[in-house]
Amino acid sequence: MAKKPTEAAKKTIVVKQIRSAARRPAVQTATLKGLGLNKMNRTRELEDTPSVRGMVNSIRHLVEIIEERG
């Protein structure tokens, strides 16, 4: 059975929180929560979309991109 066009190789990124959100502005804490990160050393696999990249870029001092898949 052929793959559907929506099932094409979706690109993902693995993001890890490397710094604490303590003493950070509320906007940065909310961005971490929006990405699904709320504790140190947690990792999440997220879709590689412009909105997710923008969120990661806005808190790049708190997270690191471990891996890019797809």
Image: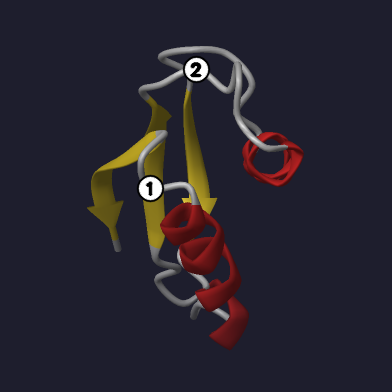
Residue 62: x and y in percent read 42, 34
Q: Residue furthest left?
A: 67
Considering the numbered disc 1 on the image, is that residue within a helix, a strand or a loop? loop
Most foreground residue, 21 or 12: 21
Element type at mark 2: loop
Say above or below: 25 vs 7: above
Residue 45 is situated, as x and y percent measured from the top left of the image, at 47, 41
Q: Please, which residue is most extreme toward the bottom here?
A: 5
5 left or right, relative to 17 = right
Q: Badge 2 local density, few (<14 within 10 Å), some, or many (20+)?
A: some
* Direction from residue 5 to residue 45 in the image, left or right: left
Say which residue appears at 68% left-offset and 34% top-offset. Answer: 29
64 left or right, relative to 55 = left
Vertical comparison of 6 with 35: above or below = below
Residue 34 image-quadrant placement: top right
Q: Amino acid at mark 1?
A: Arg
User: Which of these two is toward me, 67 or 18?
Assistant: 18
Mark 1 vs mark 2, CA separation in Å: 12 Å
The image's mark for residue 12 is none
Q: In the displayed structure, would residue 57 be above or below residue 27?
A: below
The residue to which callout 1 is attached is 60
Q: Disc 1 or 2, which lies upstream in sequence?
A: 2
Q: Which residue is mark 2?
A: 20
| Rendered residue at 60%/16% (across/down) | 22
What is the x, y in percent for residue 9? 40, 71
- Mark 1, Cα crowd under 10 Å, few <14 / some 14-19 / many 20+, is some
**Quarter of the figure with the C terminus:** bottom left
- Where residue 26 appears, as percent x and y from the top left, is 75, 37
The amino acid type, in three-letter code, at marker 2 is: Ser
The image quarter containing residue 18 is top left
